[in-house]
Amino acid sequence: MTAQHDSLIDKQLAQELESGALLLTANRRLARAYSSAYDQGQIEAGESVWQTPTILPLESWWQSLHLELQATGLTSARLLSAEQEQALWRASIESKGDGGALLSVAATAKALMKAWRTEHAFELSGADWSSYLTPDQQAYRRWSAEYRRLCEAGDFIDMARLPDLLLSLLESQDPAFVMPRQLHLRGFLQQTPQLQRFVAHCRQLGVVVASENQSALPTRRAQRTACIDAQHELKCAARWARGQLESANHAQQSDFRARRVAIVISDLHLRRTQVQRCFDEVFFAAATPAEINQHGRSYEISLGQNLDRFAPVASALRVLQLGFDCLQGADITECLLSPYIANAETEKQARALFDLQMRARGFKVIRLYQLIESEFAPAQLRKILRQLQSISTNSELLPSQWLPHVLKMLQVTGWPGDSAPQSEEYQAIEAWRNCLHEIAQLDELLGKVSGKRMLALIQELTRARVFQVQSSTAPIQIMGTLEMVGQKFDAAWVAGFDNENWPQAQRATPFLPLKWQKQVNAPGASQAWELSMSQRMIDAFTSAATETIFSYPLAINGNAVDAAWQIQSMPQVDVGSLLADGSTSAIQRVFDSVTTETIADHAGPPIDPSLPAKGGARLFEDQALCPFKSFAHHRLRIRPLEEPALGIDARDKGNFFHEAMALFWTQTKSLSALESLTEEALDLRIDECIDGAIEIAMSEQDRQRRAALLKIEKNRLKRVIHSWIDYFEKKRAPFCVEQVEQESEVEFEALKLTLKLDRVDKLADGGRVIIDYKTGKNNPVSSWMEERITRAQLPLYAVILEDIRAVCFAQVATNKQRFSGMAAEKNLLAGLQGPNNENNSWSDRLASWQQNLAKLAQEINTGHAAVVPTKNACQYCDFSPLCRIEKNALLDATQVGTD
Amino acid sequence: MSQVITDAKSRFAALDPSRSFIVQAPAGSGKTELLTRRILTLLAEVDEPEEILAITFTRKAASEMRQRVLSTLLDAQNNTPVANDYQQQGRDLAQAVLLRDQNRNWQLLQNPSRLSMQTIDSLCAVLTRQLPVTSNFGAELGVLEDARRLYLVAAQRCIEENLVEDQLGYLELQQLLVHLDNNVERVQGLLAGMLANRDQWLRHYSQAGSRGHLEQDLQALVSARFDKLEELVPAHVLTELPALLQMAADAVIGLDLDKPAQHLGGMDAIPRPAYSSGLTWQLLADFLLTNNSPFGFRKRIARTEGFPVSPADAEDLNLTVAELKQRKKQFVDWFDEMKTIDGLESMLREIRDLPLTGYTDKQWTIMESLLKLLSLCVAELHLVFRRTHRSCSGAGLQTSAHPGG
C-alpha cells in the first residue's frame, strides 16, 4: 500500500540530499515538511541513524551566508532583525516629523518595509524617481532616503538588500565558503528578479540548480462540490476528513504510515475559533474541552497566533502591567487568579474571594499599592506584590538594562507558576524570552526609555509576533492557502471557491508607482498577475494531493453565489456522496436513535423550620418573580460577579441616602421638631447627616479614591434631601418617627424571617405608616394588586406588624419625588390610594395580601423551584445560564437535536 | 415579465450614460435590473471595468448586484434562450460587454472582483489603502463594524483623566456630572454616543466653538420652518381670524378656563408666519391642534376652545344660546377651510415646539462643557485606536481628513 502515498521526497531527491544537495523552501513550514518527509523515508528504509540533510528556508540560507562572510571579515554590516528594521523605519518617519498625524506609525513602518522589499526584490531601485509621484510615494521616497542614511550610519543591512550584498561580494571576491554542488528550490509561486539573478549567479559558480518538476507527478483527481453556505462547507469538510481517517484505519491497518489529509481554508485567520469548534464537534460529539485535550486531536490548525494570546505570556504581560502601571477591568481578575503566579493553587480560594472584594469595592482600575494596602489581600499574594513593589524604579534605562529588571519582576512573582509548564506553554515561554532578548538589542535605536515605554514596547512586540506551536504531526492538517503550496497529502479539501472570494485579490503597495510594479509583474499590480497566480495556486492545490475537492458555498449572507470560474470545468460531485456517513451526521444519528424520557424536577429540599430563612422580603419578591430565581438566589446563594461601575454606583447612592435619612430622623424625631428648626439649623443638620452617612457607608480608602465624585454627590444629595423635606415631609399631618433602619425577627407561615424597615412613623391617632425609600425611578404599587406580589416587601410588613394604617414608597429621585402606596383611608398621606368603595376596605386588602403571601410562603417552604418567570422577570435576572430558559424555549420551538 | 412593459420607454431612456437619473419605484418593479443594465451599458464603453463604481447601502446588496451582472454575462456567453423583447434587450447589452471584454482582455468572468460594487464604507477603505499617508491612517486598516466598545473606552478614559483637578476638562466634567445627576455612566454613554456619530458633527466643530455661531445656526433652522409655513398660509384666511379669536378668548376668560385661547385675544391683525412672530403662531398651533398623539387638527370644537353652547355657559357669558351657536358655526366654517390646506397640519405640528430664544445661559454652559469634553474625547479615541486596535469604524474613515480638536 505504501506505493499509493507519494512522499515529498522521492528516491532521487533523497539520494541527492544525502550527497550534500541543498534544498531551499519558500517558507519555514515547508522546510519542516521536507525534513520530516526525509526522516520518514529513512525510517521506512529501515535506517536507524542518518545524517541530517540541509533543508532550509531561503532566507535562513542567506542569513547563514552572511554570517560566514562576516566571520571572514568580508563585510562588517550587521543584519537587522525584523524588529530592528521596523524600529528603524519608525525612526525614519519620526525624524521627518511626519509621524504625529498618522494613526499608526507602527503599521506604517510595516507597510514601508513591505514596499522596500518589493522595491529590491523586483529591482525597482533604478527606476526614474523624477517622474510624477503621488504624495504617498513622495513620502516613501523621503522616508526611505532617511532609512538608507540611518542604515549606512549604523552599518546595518536588511533582509531586502542582503541578496544584493551577497551577490556583490560573490562577484567581486573569491567566495570564502563552499557553495553546494546542487540546489533545489521548492514552493516558490513566483521567483522574483532578485532571486533569479542570485540563482543565475549560483549556476555560474557551477551549482546545479534544479527547479520543481511537476510533470513527474502521478495523475491527480480534482472535483468540485457545492455546499449550502460557509458554515455547512466547514462542517462537510470536517466530516469528510473524519471519513478519510476512518476508512484509512479500516482498510490499511497493516500500514504503519497514516493517511495524511489537508483542509485548506482561505480565511482561516478570521475563522480559527469557528473551525476549531466545528472540528471538535464532528470528531468529539459530546466531549468537554478537557476530555478532548486529554484524548488528543487528530487534526491540527497550522496557523500561528499572536504571542500575547498564549496564557503564560498574557499572564507575564499583566504582571509587568501591574508593576509598571495599573490593571484594568477583567485584567485585574485574570492577574489575581493567574495560575502562573506563585502559590496560585494553595491560595486559590482566598484569591478568588479577594477578587470579589475588589469588585464589590468598585475598582475599575487598580494599582499595585492599592492591592497591597487592602486588608483582604491573601498573605502569600501580598508578599509577592510587596516584592514586586520593592524592585520598582522610576529611572530611565536602556532596553538591555531593563531586561534583567523585567526578568526579576517576573521571578519575584514566581512566574511561570508552581507546576512545570506543558509543551505548548513551554514553547510559548521560550518565544517570549526570545522577544525580550530582541528588545534588549534595540539600545542604539531607542536610547534610554521609561518603564512604561519599555512595557509598551514589550506589548507591541508580543502582539505583533505570530507564534506557531510545533506539535507532533497530526494526520489532518488545517491550513491557509499559501501554506498548502508545495506540500504533499493523500487527500485535500479546499474550501471557499465561490466567485465572490476567488480569485483572492492581492494588493500592490501604494508606495511605489503602479506602472513600474506592472512592468515587473509585482504582486497584485495587474490583472494578469492575479489570474496567473490564481491558476498557479489551483495547480499547486491539485498537485499537492492525489485527490482534491474544491468546495464553494451556494450562498453568502443569504445571497446566491456561484462556483469560481477557475473550477467551473472540474467535474461536479454531490457533497453527500463525499461523506462516509451520508447526509446525516453521526451526532444526528445518535439523536435520531434515542428515545427521550422526561423527568420533571421542579423542587429543591424543603426549608428546615428550625433555621432562619435568609433573604428577608427579597425571598418573597424573588419567589413571586420566578421560583427558580428565588431558589438559586436564597437557597443556593448564587450571586453574579459584580461589575464595578464607573463612578459612584446606584447602590452606593442609595446607601448614602438611607444612612443620611436615618441619622436625620434619629436626631429630629418628629414633624414638630422639624418645624422648629430654623433654615440655618436644618441646613447644617442635613450637611452633618450627609457627611456622617458617607463615612458610615464607605471605607476611608474608597472615599479618598473618589473624592472628586463624592464632592458632587454631596451637593446632589443635599438638593434631593432638601427638596424632599421641604415639599413632602413638611406638608404632612403631624407624625413622629418611631423606628429607623430597624431589624426585627418575625415568623410568617412557619418561615423565620429577618426584616429591615427603612422607617416607621406614628400618626396622631396611634396608627403606623411604613415608609420605604426608593432612590430609583420605578416603583409600581400596581404589583400589590397581583396574585404573585413581585413587590412583596411592604405588603409583607403590613400583614406581619400591628396597627399599620398605610404602607408607602418615598420616591426620592432627583427629578421625581412623591409618596406612593396604599392607606386605610383617603387623604391619610398625599399621593396614597385609599379604599375606593366599601367592598375594598383596608382589612380586605390586608386579608388578600395575607392570602397571596401565604401561598408564596408555602412555595418557599416546600422548596418549589420551577422555572416559571412572570412577564419581564428575566429582564433583570442573571441566572439565565443556570435555568437555561432561552435554550428551553428554543427546544420547545424546534425539534430536539436537529443539526 | 412576459407581458409588454408599459414604461419600457422610460426604462430604456434611463440607460443613457450621458445623463443622470434618480430612480424611485416600488419593490419588485425592477430597479436592480435597470441598474444592472445601466452598468452593462457603461461596461461596453469604458477602457477598464474599474472605471465604473456602484455604491450600495449594504454588502449584501453589493454582492447581489455583482452576481446579477455576472449571471447576465454568463447567460449571454452560454447563449441561454431569452423569453421576450425586454430580456433580448438585456442580452444585447451583455453581448456588447462580452465583445468589449474580449477586445480589451478584461477576463471579467474569471475575475469578478474587478466589478467595483461596494458599500460606502468599503470604498472609503479602498481609498485609505491607496492613500495611506494622505489619509493619515498610515497603513491598511481593518474596518471595525461595531466600535461601540472602543467609544465607551475612550469616553471612560476621558472621564477618568478629567476627574483630577487642574486637568483640561475638569470644570466641564464637573458641570456635566451635576447636570446628569452625578451619573458617570450616563455621561460616558452620552459621550460615547456622540463619538459614534462624529461623522455628522466633527467637521462642524471648529466653527461651532462660539455661542453666537450656534445660536445663528439654530435660528436659521427655525426660520426656515416658519418660511415654509408662510408659503402655506393664504392671506385671506387671516383677515377674519382676529375677531374669532377675540370671541374665543372672551369666552374662556369669562368661564375662568385655563386654555390656550385665553392668550389669543386683543390682536388687530395676525402677523404673517416668521421667526419674529413665532410665539403667536405657536400659540395658534396649540389652539388648533390636539394635545395628544397624533397631534392633529382638533376634531371637536367645544367649550374648552372658547365656543360653548350650553344654556348655563350662555348665562355666565351674558349671551344667548343662539348667539353662541352662531359664533361656533362661524369658527367651524373658518377652521374647515383651514383644514383643506395641504400640509398645513404637519407644518403647524412642526413649528409648535421649536425653540424661539437662543440657548439659555444654563443650557449654554452645559453645551459648552459638552463641546469641550467631546474634543478631548475625540483625541482620546484617536489614542485608543492607535493603542488597541489600529482600526477604525466607518464614521472615522469618513472624517479622518478632518481631525478635530
Image (tube, coloured by chain):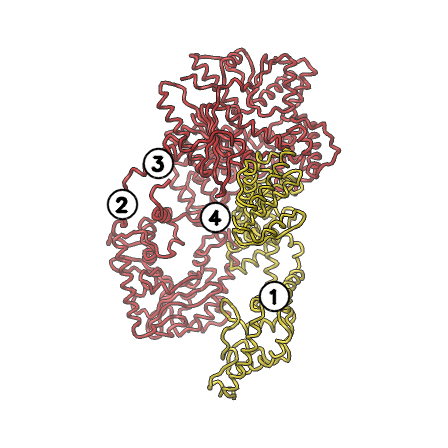
Residue behind mark 2: A598
Residue behind mark 3: A587
Callout 3 and callout 4 share a chain: yes
Reading the chain from its start, which is encountered first: label 2 or label 4? 4
Compute the Cα span from label 3 to label 4: 46 Å
Residue behind mark 4: A363
Chain coloured yellow: B
Q: Nearer the viewer, mark 2 or mark 4?
A: 2
Q: Foreground: A212 or B155?
A: A212
Q: Which mark is residue B360?
A: 1
Q: Nearer the viewer, mark 1 or mark 2?
A: 2
Q: Residues within 10 Å of mark 1 (few under 14, many from 20)?
A: few
Q: Secondary structure at mark 3?
A: helix
Reading the chain from its start, which is encountered first: label 2 or label 3? 3
Chain coloured red: A
Q: Percent x, y for residue A821?
A: 38, 67
